[in-house]
């Protein structure tokens, strides 16, 4: 009876063992294989950025008004060989408009005043020569010098008066306002003749959240972009920062200066500024989106060993919009999963794709 019981138990154990083996073989054969793509870990520069926005404005603007009356004459642009128009770039000192006024020119009498300067100078020099020989008094010399100075002053005033008949560019810039006048129409004093703007250097007022006050500093570099000129990134600098926080918005005011030598960014354009608050050069860095977080705060990526996904715990540092620094856990040249990682689990079976 005992022998029969033992045999019966043995049969049951054998059947259970065979069934377990079959289940293991079935599970092994039915295990999902996940396709993955690998990339080699390398080094690159990583920048920590604070993003802000604002409206780009020109650093120099001016409206030149007439200072006297005269007949309107729009000058020829020597670069284009046609009359000046909106958008033209003019050099500093370029004559854009003339006001013809012969009566004013005659009143100024420039040639007469030049002659008077020459006469006064010769008289002064003559009195000095005579004084040295004892034939003139010191008072005679001083009077002659005073006359010469007065003649020079009158000549300078004449040049100033005649300059009022020419509308010149006070700096290099673009014509942004050019009111239309019929040629030879009489222009009164005080009328707007031309508006100029220099936007090769620009600035942008920004509002920064108070949690950046320890990060953003005067002198930090800024990458400036606009959605209309995506292919070009302009360079800028943080030029000013207010120490005061706005109680309503919880922000503080700053200013960014922008280099715009090709004049691609236009005054009034909306721009994005990325302030480089921290930069590390040539550090091990990987794409941000492949890093997974686990309970306990661990951050992991996947490596592959014998066609199995292996969790690799890493320590990360600063990051930008695409890459994150790896301080510990990976070495240059390591291969990690960069595609297909979303479906992986530790020690899961994988197929490496090319």
Image (cartoon, helix red, strand yellow):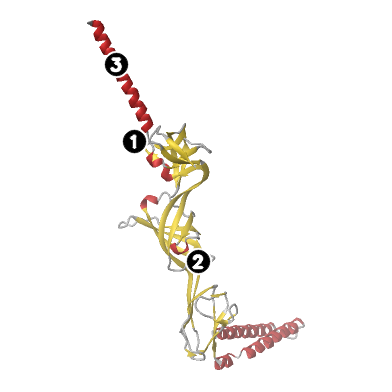
Q: Position of residue 129 (x, y in %)?
A: 75, 83
Which secondary structure lies at badge 3? helix
Picture disc at residue 239: none
256 or 36: which is nearer to us? 36
- Spatial CA distance of label 1 from label 3 is 41 Å
Q: Earlier in the sequence, mark 2 or mark 3?
A: 3
Which mark sits nearer the N-terminus, 1 or 3?
Answer: 3
Quarter containing the N terminus: top left
In the foreground, 260 or 188: 260
The residue tagged 3 is: 13
User: Who's the residue at 65% across and 87% down the image?
Assistant: 114
Is label 2 in contact with label 1 (beta carbons under 8 Å)? no
Q: Is residue 282 visible?
A: no
Between 46 and 75, the one lying in front of the other is: 46
| SS under mark 1 | loop
Distance of label 2 from label 3 (alpha carbons)? 83 Å
Q: Residue furthest right?
A: 133
Which of the numbered marks, if any, corresponds to residue 264? 2
Total number of numbered discs in the rendering: 3
Q: CA distance from mark 2 to mark 1?
A: 49 Å
Residue receiving disc 1 = 295
Compared with 66, 263 (above or below) is: above
From where the camera sits, is residue 159 visible? yes
Q: Nearer the viewer, residue 311 or 44?
A: 311
**Other residues around mark 1 within 10 Å, as few (<14) / some (14–19) / many (≥20):** few
Q: Quadrant of residue 154?
A: bottom right
User: Where residue 261 sits: x, y (%)?
Assistant: 54, 65
Q: Nearer the viewer, mark 2 or mark 3?
A: 3
Q: Position of residue 6 (x, y in %)?
A: 26, 9
Q: Residues within 10 Å of mark 3 (few under 14, many from 20)?
A: few
Q: Is residue 296 above or below residue 187?
A: above
């Amino acid at each position: 009876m005992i022998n029969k019981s033992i045999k019966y138990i043995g049969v049951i154990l054998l059947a259970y063992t065979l069934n377990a083996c079959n289940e293991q073989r079935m599970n092994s054969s039915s295990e999902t294989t996940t396709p993955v793509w690998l990339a080699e870990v390398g080094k690159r520069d990583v920048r920590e950025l604070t993003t802000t926005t604002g409206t780009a404005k020109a650093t120099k603007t001016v409206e030149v008004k007439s200072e006297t009356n005269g007949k309107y004459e729009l000058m020829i642009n020597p670069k284009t060989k046609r009359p000046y128009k909106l958008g033209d770039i003019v050099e500093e000192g370029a004559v854009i408009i003339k006001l013809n006024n012969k009566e004013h020119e005659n009143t100024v009498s420039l040639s007469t005043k030049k002659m008077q300067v020459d006469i006064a100078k010769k008289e002064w020099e003559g009195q000095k020569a005579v004084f040295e020989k004892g034939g003139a008094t010191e008072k005679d010399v001083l009077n002659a010098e005073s006359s010469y100075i007065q003649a020079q002053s009158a000549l300078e005033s004449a040049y100033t008066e005649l300059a009022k008949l020419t509308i010149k560019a006070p700096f290099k810039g673009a014509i942004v306002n050019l009111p239309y006048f019929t040629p030879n129409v009489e222009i009164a004093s005080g009328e707007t003749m031309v508006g100029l703007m220099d936007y090769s250097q620009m600035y942008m007022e920004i509002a920064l959240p108070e949690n950046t006050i320890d990060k953003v500093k005067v002198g930090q570099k800024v990458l400036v972009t606009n959605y209309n000129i995506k292919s070009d990134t302009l360079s800028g600098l943080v030029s000013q920062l207010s120490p005061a926080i706005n109680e309503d918005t919880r922000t503080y005011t700053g200013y960014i200066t922008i280099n715009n030598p090709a004049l691609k960014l236009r005054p009034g354009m909306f721009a994005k500024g990325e302030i480089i608050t921290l930069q590390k050069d040539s550090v091990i860095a990987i794409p941000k989106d492949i890093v997974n977080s686990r309970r306990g705060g661990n951050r992991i990526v996947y490596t592959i060993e014998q066609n199995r996904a292996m969790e690799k715990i890493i320590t990360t540092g600063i990051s930008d919009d695409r890459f994150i620094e790896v301080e510990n856990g990976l070495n240059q040249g390591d291969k990690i999963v960069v595609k297909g990682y979303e479906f992986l689990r530790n020690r899961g079976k994988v197929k490496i794709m090319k």
